[in-house]
Amino acid sequence: MRIHCVLVMLCVFLSIKSFSQCCGGGGGSPIAGGASQGVLLEKQMEVNSNFQYINTNKFYSGNKPDTNFLDNYNSKYVYTRLAYGLSKNLTFSLETGYWLNKTQIGLHKVDTNSSTGIGDLIIFPRYDIFKITKNSKQTELTVGLGFKIPLGSYNDSSKHILIQEPVLPNEIYYSTKTLSVQTSSGAHDLIFYLFFYRGNNIKKLNFFANAIYIKKGWNPIGEKIGDYASVGLFASKTFLKKLGITMQLKGEWADKMQLNKTVYLNSYPNYNPEATGFRKVFIVPQVSYTVKKLTFYLLSEIPLYQEMIKTQISSQYQMAFGISYRFYLADPTKKSESESK
C-alpha cells in the first residue's frame, strides 16, 4: 500500500498547492505532498520533498479555446513536508514550499511579471475514523482538517523607470505585480479532507477515493480567492514488490474570487476579478519505485475537460517528481514487548 499512497497524496496536494486564479496557469491549490492519504504508523516519521512544474500558453472562454492574452505562464516550486504518527490513528504534518519562479510573460514579450520566494505554511492533522483488516483485504476511512498560514508576499511590486525629456530626470515608480505571480494569496484558509481506501494485500490491487474542500479567507487588501473543491478516484497496482502504477481521475471546481468594495476606492485591480472560477477534469498517470525506505515518484496531470468563467489561461502541462523517506524515531517493537510483560 505504501507505494501507491505516496503517489496518491502527492496528487491530492499538488491540486491544493497550485491553486491561483487570475491567469494562475492551471492547477487547483497550497499543499503538495507525498505521504499516505491515511495515517502513518505510530512513531513513524516521513520527510518528503518534490519539484513541481507548470507551463501553459492556452486560453479558454467557457469550454472553448480562445485568443491568447499572454505568451506564457510558468512556475517552478519546491515542496517539503514533515509528518509524524502521534498514534496509530493520528498523524500530524507541517508543509511548506519555495517558489523558484512564478512568471507571466505578456503578449509579444511585453509586460513580463515574475516573483520568487517562500509560499505558505500548512498545518495538517489527519485522523483514521476506522481501519479494518480482514483476511487480505483492508478498508480505511480518514478525515483531515488543515490550516494554511500565509508566509509569502501577496502585494509584491515591481520597479519601473519612465524616460523623460533630455532636460528632465527619469521618473521612478512602482506597481503591484499581478495576482498570478504573488507567492501567496495573503489569506488564512481552512482545508477539509476525506479519504477512503480499499485494498487487497495479496493481489496488490488498491482503490482510493478522496474529497477536498478549501474555504478561502480574505487577505489584508480585501481580496478573496474563490473556494476550491476536488474529488479524486484512484486505482493502483504493485509489480515486483517495488514498482507502483497508479491512475487517477480528478475533478476540480473553483468559485469566482471576491473583492471588498474598498479595493475600488484606491485603484482598479490589474486583473479582472470576474474572469475567475473554473471546472476541470484531469487524468493523472503516476509511477513510483521503492528502494528500502526511499520512494521515488513521478506524475503528470493531463487535462481532459476545462470550462472557464469568461476568458482565462488554462491548464496545459503539469508535472511533479520527488522522493519520500520514512523511518521510525523509536523502535516500535519495544512498546509491544513492554505491553506483553
Image: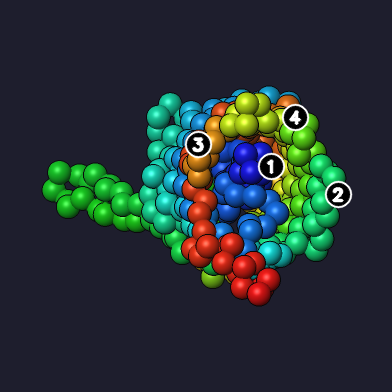
Nearer to us of marks 2 and 3 is: 2
Where residue 132 sits: x, y (%)?
83, 55
Give whichever of discs 2 and 1 has the lower sequence position.
1
Q: Which residue is mark 4?
A: 305
Instruction: For mark 2, give the secondary structure.
Output: strand
Residue type for callout 3: Val
Nearest the eye: 99 or 168:
99
Where residue 57 sits: x, y (%)?
54, 28
Give whichever of discs 4 and 3 has the lower sequence position.
3
Nearer to us of marks 4 and 2 is: 2
C-beta proximity under 8 Å, tags 1 and 3: no
Where residue 289 sits: x, y (%)?
55, 32
Q: What's the distance in space between the residues labelled 2 and 1, CA to CA?
A: 15 Å
Instruction: For mark 4, give the secondary structure.
Output: strand
Instruction: For mark 1, give the secondary structure.
Output: loop
- Tell me if residue 176 can be seen: no
Vertical order, 88 against 60 (above or below):
below
Q: Quadrant of residue 225?
A: bottom right
Q: Which mark is residue 134?
A: 2
Q: Which residue is mark 3?
A: 291
Give whichever of discs 4 and 1 has the lower sequence position.
1
Q: Which mark is residue 124?
A: none
C-beta proximity under 8 Å, tags 2 and 3: no
Q: Which residue is mark 1?
A: 1
Residue type for callout 4: Tyr
Nearest the eye: 325 or 334:
334
